[in-house]
């Protein structure tokens, strides 16, 4: 794949604020953030607890709406979208990986990976083939019919990564994906993200662990809702 | 698409087996009640209308108003008399008419005194033959009454086994009716008219004599020329009798019952019973619905994080709504299917029991497919309806809030 001369902007946050009002108090979870992330970038977001990392991820992932400011995904302002359009964005353009894996406990590994495709109305045959292929690629070809409770933490998180990739999204958002794993499994996951960014996916990873942050091309440090390492 | 959501919902119910079954309990009971009681009701209706259809549709019965179906004699209203009988006999369209007596009498046997129902049999051979044929009266032991018999009595089928008198009354035995000795000449086969199974029957003239009945008739049974003129003839009789008694229309102190009327009044009673039964079943279904709503609320709370996850991977509000509604609907549907099966079994059991107790295949339960399918779909709708609000709330959860659990 030839490198593009001009990198494409996939994510752009313009003067974004997210305030929570708790009684008289206002929590400034995100307090004026401007960043642009290009296609294929692997970005790590670090910072102390409560600095607004998760809040930022939720805004980029269209799970939450900013109090002020604009967020562009592929040049489209998601702040203007209604709930069903946001669902489309989450389903097609974004793949989420959570700290607690968030697999559906009643579904097998294969069914979990197929689920995002169910919401995109992809036919069963195609879903099954693609889910099978994704799981096999990350070394879980033998675990297709296992329930999450029958998998180790590292295996669960790999299933979650496969699920995030199901609809071939442009952006992978991972909030502390290694937080519940030992350092060996954590590194395996981080290496998967490196590979994905090399394949052209844009990856944003939130982490506490400097060892994991090292895998990223770029590190943003958040403090009190602001980026502090510009 | 539907299949995918169905699988998701079904999986969720399976995961919480015990709770799912407990939730469906209310629906089981309601639907089982609906199916069994309505099936039994319909069976009963068929049995009862069958009873009356054995009275062929060309027969009318005239009796005093107010005396109802029970034994007359105690009321102070105008009695039917031989004069009425003569009058009716002359009305065009009336083929034959017989006066009938129906009384409670004192029977003595084996030194024991008991009271039983007695019905008269017409003296005229043509009329009693007709009565035997149309009422399907046949001897199981001994023979039927015939002209020339004197002080002979027929017993209903129950006396084959009835030991109320301390021992069985057999054919040939003597019993005392109002202190006058009669010989048992026959015991009848079971009749579809329950009353006759436990009754004594003797000739009209003898009954009049033994009971010292004057110019008084309890019922007048008559046959019209053809079933098509039954209603019309009934009207004619009413008119003639009104004129004879100098009564205004609607103020009759007598009634002319046509078979149609009898069936209608029975149907009215059965409908009333059905309404009560359905009312009870409805209450149980409402309780069942509340159970489903409760379970769905709990389920939404417990699965908040799952809902958030599904939204994060692309589920729309409508997708979430569909999944939860289907789950609630399935609770109703499965509850309905199990309930309908249980109800059918109960109805079958009761009807078989009743048939054994009555010793006849009278009670055929009518499992109408529309009743079973109807109640199952109704159960499904109850599920959907009860699950509507919790499912709507699930669908409206904000993804971030839901993900926090
Ligand atoms: N729903 C909410 N209501 C009120 N305040 C909130 C809410 N969500 C987050 N906050 C506050 O916003 C701030 C940023 O929270 P956020 O979860 O983004 O932090 P974080 O950097 O992800 O922390 P951690 O590393 O502990 O996960 C915190 O002070 C938090 O208390
Ligand atoms: Mg966080």
Image (cartoon, coloured by chain):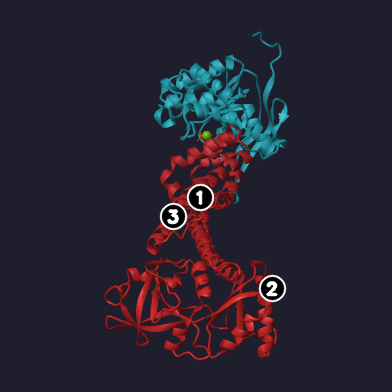
Chain colours: A cyan, B red
Please give the name of the residue rendered at 49% of the width and 53% of the height, measured from the top-left corner: B27
**Could you classify mark 1 by the number of other residues whose Cα lies within 10 Å: few (under 14), some (14-19), or many (20 or more)?**
many
- Classify mark 2: helix, strand or loop: helix
- Classify mark 1: helix, strand or loop: helix
Please give the name of the residue rendered at 37% of the width and 87% of the height, measured from the top-left corner: B178
Location of residue A18 with respect to A44 vertically, above or below? below
* Marker count (numbered): 3
Q: Can you tell which quarter of the image residue A217 is in?
A: top right
For label 2, being within 8 Å of ligand 1 is answered no
**Could you classify mark 2 by the number of other residues whose Cα lies within 10 Å: few (under 14), some (14-19), or many (20 or more)?**
some
Q: Is residue A212 left or right of residue A165?
A: left
**Could you classify mark 3 by the number of other residues whose Cα lies within 10 Å: few (under 14), some (14-19), or many (20 or more)?**
many
Q: Is residue B66 left or right of residue B228?
A: left
Which residue is labeled 1 in the image? B336
| Mark identifier at residue B232 | 2
User: Which residue is situated farthest in the top direction here?
Assistant: A2
Which-is-in-front pick, marks 2 and 1?
2
Which-is-in-front pick, marks 3 and 2?
2
| Mark identifier at residue B348 | 3
Q: Nearer the viewer, residue A175 or A20?
A: A175
Location of residue B44 with respect to A210 vertically, above or below? below
Q: Earlier in the sequence, mark 1 or mark 3?
A: 1
Q: Tell me whether circle 1 and circle 3 mark residues in contact (CB < 8 Å).
A: no
Q: Earlier in the sequence, mark 3 or mark 2?
A: 2
Instruction: Measuring from the top left, give residue B387's x and y in whole percent.
Output: 56, 49
Image quarter where the C terminus of chain A lies is top right
Instruction: Measuring from the top left, give residue B316's x and y in whole percent.
Output: 63, 37
Q: Earlier in the sequence, mark 2 or mark 1?
A: 2
């Amino acid at each position: 794949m030839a490198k593009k001369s001009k990198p494409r902007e996939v994510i752009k946050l313009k003067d974004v604020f997210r305030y929570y009002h708790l009684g008289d108090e206002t929590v400034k979870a995100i307090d004026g953030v401007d960043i642009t992330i290009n296609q294929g970038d692997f970005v790590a977001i670090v910072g102390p607890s409560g600095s607004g990392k998760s809040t930022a991820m939720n805004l980029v992932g269209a799970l939450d709406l900013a109090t002020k400011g604009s967020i562009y995904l592929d040049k489209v302002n998601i702040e203007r979208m209604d709930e069903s359009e946001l669902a489309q964005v989450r389903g097609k353009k974004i793949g989420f990986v959570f700290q607690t894996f968030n697999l559906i406990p009643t579904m097998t590994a294969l069914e979990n990976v197929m689920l995002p495709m169910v919401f995109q109305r992809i036919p069963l045959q195609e879903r099954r083939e693609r889910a099978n292929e994704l799981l096999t690629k990350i070394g879980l070809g033998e675990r297709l019919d296992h329930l999450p409770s029958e998998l180790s933490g590292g295996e669960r998180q790999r299933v979650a990564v496969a699920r995030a990739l199901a609809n071939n999204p442009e952006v992978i958002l991972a909030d502390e994906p290694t937080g519940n794993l030992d350092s060996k499994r954590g590194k395996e996951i981080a290496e998967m993200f490196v590979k994905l960014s090399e394949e052209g996916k844009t990856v944003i990873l939130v982490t506490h662990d400097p060892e994991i942050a090292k895998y990223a091309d770029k590190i943003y440090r958040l403090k009190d809702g602001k980026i502090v390492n510009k | 698409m539907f299949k995918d959501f169905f699988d998701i919902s079904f999986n969720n119910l399976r995961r919480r087996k015990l709770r799912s079954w407990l939730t469906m309990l209310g629906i089981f009971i309601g639907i089982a009640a609906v199916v069994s009681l309505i099936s039994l009701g319909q069976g009963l209706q068929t049995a009862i209308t069958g009873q009356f259809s054995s009275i062929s549709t060309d027969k009318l019965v005239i009796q005093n108003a107010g005396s109802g179906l029970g034994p007359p004699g105690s009321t102070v209203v105008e009695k039917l008399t031989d004069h009425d009988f003569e009058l009716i006999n002359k009305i065009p369209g009336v083929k034959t008419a017989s006066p009938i007596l129906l009384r409670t009498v004192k029977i003595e046997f084996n030194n024991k005194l008991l009271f039983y129902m007695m019905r008269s049999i017409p003296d005229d051979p043509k009329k009693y033959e007709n009565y035997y044929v149309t009422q399907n009266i046949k001897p199981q032991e001994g023979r039927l009454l015939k002209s020339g018999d004197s002080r002979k009595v027929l017993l209903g089928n129950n006396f084959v086994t009835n030991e109320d008198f301390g021992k069985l009354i057999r054919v040939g035995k003597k019993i005392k009716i109002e202190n006058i000795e009669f010989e048992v000449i026959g015991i009848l086969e079971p009749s579809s008219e329950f009353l006759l199974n436990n009754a004594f029957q003797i000739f009209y003239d003898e009954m009049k004599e033994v009971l010292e009945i004057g110019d008084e008739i309890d019922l007048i049974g008559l046959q019209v020329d053809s079933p098509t003129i039954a209603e019309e003839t009934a009207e004619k009789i009413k008119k003639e009798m009104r004129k004879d008694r100098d009564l205004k229309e609607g103020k009759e102190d007598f009634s002319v019952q046509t078979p149609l009327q009898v069936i209608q009044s029975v149907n009215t009673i059965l409908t009333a019973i059905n309404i009560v039964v359905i009312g009870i079943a409805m209450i149980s279904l409402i309780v069942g619905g509340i159970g489903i709503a409760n379970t769905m609320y709990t389920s939404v709370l417990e699965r908040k994080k799952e809902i958030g996850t599904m939204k994060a991977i692309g589920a729309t509000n409508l997708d979430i709504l569909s999944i939860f509604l289907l789950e609630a609907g399935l609770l109703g549907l499965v509850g309905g299917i199990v309930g309908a099966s249980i109800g059918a079994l109960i109805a079958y059991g009761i009807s078989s029991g009743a048939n054994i107790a009555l010793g006849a295949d009278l009670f055929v339960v009518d499992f109408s497919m529309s009743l079973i399918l109807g109640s199952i779909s109704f159960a499904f709708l109850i599920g959907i309806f009860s699950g509507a609000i919790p499912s709507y709330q699930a669908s409206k959860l904000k993804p971030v809030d839901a993900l926090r659990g």
